[in-house]
Structures are given as structure tokens and as C-alpha cells.
Amino acid sequence: MHENFSRKKYAFQWLTNHISMKCHPSPYWRTATLLSTGEEELPISVGVNIMRMSTYCIAVQADEDEYLLINSLTGAVDVVDTDVINLLQTDLSQGDPSILNFLQERGHITDASSQEEFSHMEDFYRGVRPGICNRKRHIIIPTYKCNLRCTYCWESALYKNGASWMEKTLSFQEVDSLFEAVGELDKGVQQLEPLIYFGGEPMLPENVNLIAHMMKEGTERGYEHYFVTNGVTIPDYLDLLVSHPIKGIQITVDGMQSTHDSRRKGPRGEGSFHRIVEGVELLRDHSIKTYIRVNVDKLNINSIGELASFFKEYGWHDDAYLTMYLAPVFPHGCGGYSKAFTREASISGLISLWNNHDVWDVFKKGISDFHPVESALRGEAWSPQFFNCGAHCDQLFFDAHGSIYTCWEAVGETQHCVGRFIPHLQFNENYKKWMERTVFTIEKCRSCELAFLCGGGCAYDAYEQHHTISEPTCGHAEKVLREYIPFYYNYVLRGNSHSK
Ligand code: SF4
Ligand code: SF4
């Protein structure tokens, strides 16, 4: 058994480490840095008392006689065979001492009680939270107005507020209040996060002067800039983009022209595909880092292969300045859009795409950080999921009405407003609720073995389902672990493909 066990330990290669601005960017990469600098050490006691399998050690079957042993306290991920799994599930005292030593060193077996393991993590979290969350990501919504009417847009629900509410745009004076607030929040922060421009559409032709003003003010204060745009007006903004420090541009392409134009169209139904492709080519010409997001749902999933071939034909998949990634469209916040995936179905749907060579070639570098276990598999520092996403940590949205939010999908929904920055920065009681939503404060998560892999699930989903963000949202975590992680290990890390 020992020989098998040793032989089956793999040295994983580090694959990618881009910061892709997906719908819900996570703070993992920063946590990982913190952990790897040795500022704190994960508090796992290794003793010689009665040993048991750690509550937070999960075995995931990856192949017939191959299991991933994942420990969410230490971040250890090891490949073992069925004998080791059987040993863990029966009498540890019968085990080979060298294997037991190894399992103990990796935290898969422990002499700490379940409660002690949890308490250690709680103490650890209190210590590291300021380091993880003090450096804020400021996401600016200069207006909710948009020049497209995408069929699945979750912000379309905001049209009920009326045209003047949608079209309200930050004034220059309000931008002063914004930078006053941002300056207050970033006081003493050494390494600033880029300012992110979001919407509505942040690159409307009529707002060039306003955005130029914000970029100038931001650059003078040491910020880089990142845009989440539909990409229709890149030529209008090119001068600004080449004359300021740009961290990246995120642009969405949903399929070949007919598919894309049927989903991402203007107010009169006009298509946007050609203008977007031209815009991406302009960004390539100027070596501006661009992330191409492809929103996938039941309507376009079968045409992703054709789109991947198009990207290859244009040489986009080989361009160091371009990263393509797939993002499932979820039902919530989309105005009841019936073609969206459920979170569970999206996993199987995305995995099924890997049967196609072109999809594989184009999107493999864009798969990353869908789940924290991926970074552990790549051998990077581990960051336990104390909370589900940046909405409980470092993420702040400043909108055109002077309101502050923390969640991408909650922007504009006043019940989720966490504060104001006009006239001055002020947080309300909602802010505390969003910041305190962790696996330590949700009762069910406190006794869940998946806690540090899951983080308590999406708070916005919880509100949709229970009218409170204090409830957990389970289901997705287990599915990702059992289906996506074996897929990532077998097909992404080991370079296999279903059809290769
Ligand atoms: S949301 Fe559910 S699966 Fe996730 S940690 Fe909480 S109880 Fe566990
Ligand atoms: S709470 Fe949910 S919807 Fe909001 S940012 Fe987090 S994961 Fe996204």
C-alpha cells in the first residue's frame, strides 16, 4: 500500500494566475499571498493522542482507484488510493506508521476535536481578516444608463425606477465626494486596488469627459483603472485608455454574430457584434490587457464551439493580452429569465463543453479560480473560505445616486444599500450584516464539514429565498466538489481532454 501511495502523489504544475474580473471576483489571490508570506500560520496542532480523521478532510473520487484528499483547514490536497480511504474510514491504529505520519503532517488526521478545529479557525480568521479585507476594491457606477438591452441583464429590473433614475449620472462635484470617500477608506493602504468602472455602461460616448476627469483624479492618487464594458464604444475611449495606467478591460461576447446580436442588442434591436470585435482588435493593437467574458446559458451553450473556432481564427487564443473565459448566467436578478442555468446545472453544462477541442484550446487558460480547491491543486497557498465572496469583505460599489452596495447583483436595490458617499461617507446597519456574514455567524455552517470550502453560499440568493442574508445557501458547494474538482484535476491540470 505504501508504494502505491507514494507513487500516486503528484507534483502539480502551476498553471495560470491571472486576476480575471468575473461576475464575482474573489479575494482569494490576496489571501493566498498573505498566507504564503508566513505572517500567520494555520493553527493545526499535530499531536500523538487519539487520532481521528479531521472533520474538514474530504475525500473526492477522481478516478477508479484514485481519490483527492482535500483538507480545507490546511489546504493539503493529496492523491491517494482506495486503501488509504479505507484506512481513514476504519481503525487508524492498524495503519502503516509512515502513512499515518504523512496523513498527520498534512492535517488529514488529527488529535484535535471537531470543536477545537473550528475554534482554531475562528481565532485565525479574527487575526487575518483586517489583512484580507482592509484593502478595498472600489467599483464605480457613473450611471445605470446603458446603450444595450441584453436579454438576460439582471439590472433590467431597475427600469421600473423610471428613465430619469436610470439616466442619472454622477456630476463632477459628486465625483469629488466619491474621491473623498475612497481616500478615507484607503487611508494607510500601501498597495491600492485598481478603480473599477461598471454600470449600466461606463463607456457611454456622452460621458467621455466625466470618465476622463475620474481617471485623471484616480491616477493622481495612485490608482490604476479597470473597465467592465460592453465594448461597443472602445474607439471613443481609446485616447484615455492609452494615456492612463490600465489594469484591464472586460468585454462580453456571447457567440457568433447572429447569436450574439440576438442577445446583446441596442434599444432599437441593432446588433453589437462587429463593433465589439473591432474594439477588441483596437485594444490588441495597443497591447491593453483584455478579458473576454462569454455568458453561457441554455440558449447559446451549443454554439460555444463555433465561437471558439472564431477566436482561434482571429488568433485571440494565442494573444498574451487576451484571456477568454466562460461565465454561466444564473436566474436570480435576471428578471425571471427562463433560459438561465440553475447553479447546479451550470457545472454539468460547462463541463460538457470540454468535449470540443476548440473550446478546450481557447478557454483552458480562462478556467481558474472557479473554486478555491483549484489553487490548492496547483500547489499555491491555500485560502480557506471564511465567507462566500468579496461582498462580505473588500468590495464596494459607489453608484450614480450616491449609494454604496457590496454585491454585484444587489446594486440599485435600496434594501441592500449599505451606505452613502454623498455628501460624505457613511455606512448603515446593513453594512455590518453583510460584513459579518461568515461561516462563523451562520448557524448551519458552524457544523458543516464543507464550511471552509463553501463560505456559506451566495447572500443574494439567500435573500431571494428567505428575505434575509443570514441563512445559508447550500447545494452548489457539494456539486462543485464532486463534479467540477475531479474534472479540473483530470482534464485541466493533467492535460487530458474527453476527446484527446
Ligand atoms: S452554506 Fe451549506 S454547504 Fe455551505 S458551509 Fe453553510 S451549511 Fe455548509
Ligand atoms: S452575494 Fe452572491 S450575487 Fe452578490 S457578489 Fe456575492 S456571490 Fe455574487
Image (cartoon, rainbow, N blue to C red):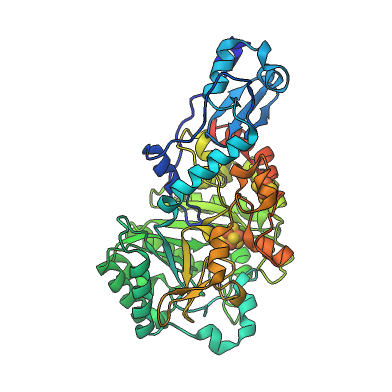
Closest to the observer: 88 or 313?
88
Q: Position of residue 478 (x, y in %)?
A: 69, 43
Whether residue 499 is visible, yes or no, is no
From the viewer's perspective, is residue 72 above or below residue 408? above
From the viewer's perspective, is residue 459 above or below residue 415? above
Q: In this figure, what is the number of numbered marks?
A: 0
Closest to the observer: 245 or 253?
245
Q: Position of residue 22 (x, y in %)?
A: 52, 57
Question: Residue visible at 52% across and 46% down?
Answer: 369
Q: Where does the N terminus fall, quadrant-wise?
A: top right
- Which residue of the protein is positioned furthest toward the bottom in this rendering? 164
Q: Position of residue 379 (x, y in %)?
A: 47, 32
Q: Where does the C terminus fall, quadrant-wise?
A: top right
Question: Residue visible at 54% across and 89% down?
Answer: 164
Q: Position of residue 86 (x, y in %)?
A: 71, 19
Closest to the observer: 237 or 51?
51
Question: Residue visible at 42% across and 53% down?
Answer: 130
Question: Residue visible at 66% across and 13% down?
Answer: 93
**Quadrant of the rendered image containing residue 172:** bottom left
From the viewer's perspective, is residue 441 above or below residue 141? above
Whether residue 36 is visible, yes or no, is yes
From the viewer's perspective, is residue 167 above or below residue 16? below
**Figure quadrant, ligand 2:** bottom right
**Quadrant of the rendered image containing residue 197:** bottom left
